[in-house]
Amino acid sequence: MTWLIELDERLFFLINGLARKSAGFDEFMTILVGDYFIPLLMSMVLFALWFLGKDAQARERNQRTVFCTAAGVGFAAAVVKLMNLGLDRLRPFEAHPDTVNLLFYACTDPSFPSNSTAAAFAFATGAWFGNRKAGALLFLLAIVWSFTMVYCGIHYPLDIIGGAAIGILVAYAAVWVLRLVEPLPTLVLKGMRRIYLA
Amino acid sequence: MTWLRWETFGADYLLLVFMVSLGVVQLAAAWRRLGGLSLFFRRRYPGYIFAVVIIGAGYWLFFSEPRDIPDYAGGLGGSQQFIYTLAGIAIASLFTFAVSSALNARWGRSDTGEEEGLDALKRMTYLQAVKRGFRGKSR
């Protein structure tokens, strides 16, 4: 395990070492890494998906995708919360306070796994099942967001990989759970269609 | 833009979500030709431009000051952010339904009686569609 941690830290310093070279780029990355810019963009892609689709069938598939993705994100957050009870890896800026370029506020939750990455990849995977274009866009946003977390000094690459794996697996589980609770999603969609919301 | 800043961070975030959601609905309305949801422009390209301007303005207003504030110092926690996001989307949707129904009250009503759900809003406003729904049930 030691070699993996060493490799992880080496990769972290390689990426985080790029920071503080350009003030403008750092400021841009600080906006991207925040809790509001990319997460809201991802939520809005999902919200737009609710209205889109060539015909009623395609739109219904997109709307099921929205349910599935929302469930996946909720499950991912719950799994990470549970894992945080047992795992307590220090954040990079706590473990190496003198060498890390910290461009964001000092987060207080454990470093591994990255909860933001888990949610982002759950978003992307959930959307990918129902709509490849939306899924690809969300994967791109998830990857960009994950990179900024290492660049800004708040996560190690291994935290990101762990979070992404949880997000992807949990999104698969959400698809399965939604199939189990059928016909509930169908009934909800039918009800919403009757009042012109779906 | 201090006159637009409310007292709390949560209110700023709610305004951001409201404006961006409003833009997304207008974008979708222009793309899927849901004229009943259009606020000002039923034609496609003016609708796109209007939507992009609202979304851009929302982001610009919010990010015109530093937002890397932790939840222990006035920022939003994960669950709070989730609730504010849902609330912003709901308020923007209700606002769109109400205002588009009022602005387009004289438009539409070419009711073929075939379209269901959102498709009905291609030919009528949300209020007209709901009234049609009630009439259908009372028959």
Image: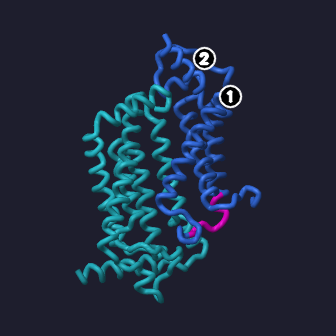
Chain colours: A cyan, B blue
To which residue does mark 2 refer? B109
Per the image, is B113 magenta?
Answer: no
Q: Residue at x 48, y 50 (%)?
A: A43
Q: Residue at x 38, y 54 (%)?
A: A73
Using the image, determine if residue A163 lies above or below residue A59: below
Using the image, determine if residue B121 lies above or below residue A158: above
For the residues tagged 2 and 1, is the chain the same?
A: yes
The percent coordinates of residue A50 (x first, y second) are: 46, 38
Name the chief secondary structure element in magenta. loop
Using the image, determine if residue A157 lies above or below residue B86: below
To which residue does mark 1 refer? B102
Q: Chain of mark 1?
A: B
Q: Which residues are magenta?
A: B62-69
Horizontal side of B63 relative to A188 (left or right) equals: right
- The amino acid marked with disc number 2 is Arg
Q: Secondary structure at mark 2?
A: loop
Using the image, determine if residue A189 lies above or below residue A155: above
Q: State which mark lies toward you, 2 or 1.
A: 1
Q: Chain of mark 2?
A: B
Nearest the camera: A137 or A48?
Answer: A48
Q: Which label's residue is closer to the chain start, 2 or 1?
A: 1
State which quadrant residue A22 falls in.
bottom right
- The amino acid marked with disc number 1 is Ala
Nearest the camera: A35 or B11?
Answer: B11
Residue at far right of view:
B3
Residue B14 is labelled as: none
Residue at far front of view:
B138
Q: Residues within 10 Å of mark 2 (few under 14, many from 20)?
A: some
